Image: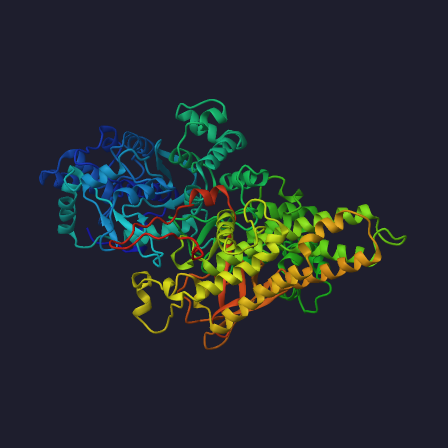
Amino acid sequence: MEQMSKDDLAAKYSDAEFRSKLFRLTSMGELVGACLIANNFRPSKDFYEAIRLTPYGEEKLQQFLRKKIPYQEARLSCFLEFSWLDLLVDVLATDDAALQQAIGEHIKKGEISYPFIFGRELYDRAFDKLTLKDDGAHLTLSETLEFLDGTPQGVFQGHNMVTGPYGLLTSQQIRFYSPERHPSLMHCSDVNCGRIHEVHLTTSQTALINKHRSEATKVLRRESETPSAWGSFLADIFSRTVNTARDDIGDGLISLLGDALTVEELRKCVEWLLDGTSGRLRNVLQELGIRGKAQDISRHLNRAEMMQLCLTLSDRDVINCIDALVHVGDIQVPSEEVRTPIVNEAAFGKFRVSAELGPHGVRLHSRTMNVAPLRLRHLIESMYRLDYVEDREELDWQLRNEDADSLEAKLDKYLQNRSPRDVLEALVLARKSNAVTACEVLRLRDGAAEDPEFISTILWKLGFASVLNQDPHRKFWKLHEEMERMVRGVPGSPLGPTLEEFRGAAANYFVELETILDDSICFTVWSLTSDHVASKRPFTYRVDEELARSHEWLQRAASRSSDNLLEYGDRVSLYALCRGYQSIAAELIRVANRRMEFIRPVDEFPQWAGQQNLQKFPFAHTIPFLDLTDNARETLIKRLQEISRSLVSEEVYSARNDWLHGRRNVTSFEKVRSSLQAIRTAVQLVEDSGFARIPYAVLDRTTDGYGRRVATLESTRGFRFSLLYPTRFDWLDMPGDGRAVHIMNAAVFSPPNHVLRFVSEMSSPYTEMWSDYPKRKPRSQRAIKAMGMAAPEE
């Protein structure tokens, strides 16, 4: 028999049903081939008897038997090889359902096993039990079995078959997430290394199937060193079946379920899917002998069991489930949070699509291309079918103000010159059928079109960057302007507001003022005194944690003062907040005078810092304030002092009682006016200096012919800042232009505009799940030091 080319194979095996079953059986074989087995593994009778061989396969089977390969292993070897010059396995005669059931029994019994790589269990176990050597951990078979003992059966998917604790279940959705023998599970001790190192697991080489498989391969190679072009032929079937060029491949949902949802959130998903999918998940459970109320079923399931059950359903079911739970708050996603898989990042298809979860639900996001504008165009063409006269006329009327020769040209111009939000508000909301089509194309949950956030949800699903819709100072400035308007009218006068109206507004105003001042001083303390390089979350402000630690820092700094009113904690007085900036300035001056005590140990510098000359590491101290330029440190101190001086000189801290109690006259309201002006000056200086967590997002990106790029960021307060690329500081893990960032304009560490940049992280079940990630074992002979902010020197 001669080798066959891909074209030969395509001509011989052209039947669609045959190809479909061939693809499924070879996928099943790949799942089995990637498993872990012990020395005593033997395939069951149901396993090897479900395999039917072609005449060519029977011929090779006899040759295997003559080489003393046991019958079970010889037959299984034919299945694992599947083809050589021709097919070894008779595709149509093989009972794939019986074969799947037999393999599933081996998986349920643990005789065939896979590592459960998702969530925290195996990652934490690797930290506790393993040691990295040569950038990895290499385990023997006995060490592998011991390491995996007691952990759940791994969840992976090949074709429409999902491995896991329930064996090998059938899914309504074809996906591919291959079993992993070398999972990434460990971080090394280098805090500047973001790589997750591999743990190399070992399967038995003395189990009869592996012991004799190499001999079976030798038999096949005696006939021909190279097989027919099965790899190319199957790759072509894979591409045509999976449609790898799609921009909505949902395979990334596997790692999103595994790494971005807590166990309780997964439990909510299972309950929703049991009751919200017209019995589709219940049918799966009934085949497993499981019945009952959704909560009773889910109560005792672990992460692996719940993942496997969820993955038996379609991508649409899974996405609609998560979206619905986010909408009702059963999955809590803060407004600026974007959940992504932590350990098991994965991207699929030509567009390298991964799954993300935000406050508007799940989206499938391309990592290599900005597909959002293209998706927007496709959505419009789905709503207005351009091959229908009525739809063309309707869209042409919508675009009547565009000056172009054709409808297609008008649409191009329209999309180029208007913001995506304006486009969606004008076209999606133009008629009910458009909203219905948008929900269908984007696979939105039921009721999404009636939600006030409908347009924001569409923007998110299309892949547009999150629009900055949260100005942390918006409420304050609105109240401030209201206060100034009231004072101009003189409260209590015939034409002005009543005193009761003024007092009510003043009460709300001072609450908001205290909120933004407290957040500002805590953020400033953390920004300037924390060792961001050594942090588990570099340059990430974790609000709930850092607030208390900043108060402790301020209290220690305040202990140097003779002012007994300076107290920081759960209830901070307005007086202490006004004086807080001066306390920060005084402590930074003290730290600067003892800067030699904060020099970073040599072994804490990243390895790359001394290996090349193009990238610089500017943080030679463990307190970043000390690594700012001389001018920046001087300016920063002056601004902190000026903020406190402005607030204290007008005795803003005593204004609350003065404004809320007693009778008022024209003279007292002159004092109110001056206090309001002092507050305006101080808060504006806080914003101008970057001492507040004002978010910036990309407004524009430009690239010249030399590859130099400029990203212009704009804040919700209208400030703009430009980031230039490439720079000498691109390896610092400092947040760039890919997400909303806080720019501390006053904190320049390299002129002209290299400043400290940060992101915020709100507490959520997701952040709590990964709160102590990454875990790193200390280097030998290396002191373990706190990863938080440096305490004021005593």
Name the spot of residue 330 as percent of width and height, x first.
Answer: 54, 36
**x and y percentages locating residue 628 in the rendered image:** 46, 69
Residue 169, image quadrant: top left
Q: Observer-nearest residue: 244 or 58?
A: 244
Q: Position of residue 255 (x, y in %)?
A: 41, 45
Q: Is residue 399 visible?
A: yes
Instruction: From the viewer's perspective, tell me whether residue 750 is left or right of residue 412.
Output: left
Q: Nearer the viewer, residue 106 or 576?
A: 576
Q: How many marks?
A: 0
Q: Is residue 374 left or right of residue 47?
A: right
Residue 382 visible, this angle: no
- Image height of 338 relative to 320, above or below: below
Q: Nearer the viewer, residue 793 or 2?
A: 793
Residue located farthest toward the bottom when viewing the structure as drawn: 706
Location of the C terminus by quadrant is bottom left
Is 160 placed above or below 688 here?
above
Q: Nearer the viewer, residue 508 or 149?
A: 508
* Picture coordinates of residue 445, whole percent (x, y): 58, 41
Q: Is residue 395 left or right of residue 344?
A: right
In the rendered image, the vertical position of residue 68 relative to residue 339, given as above or below: above
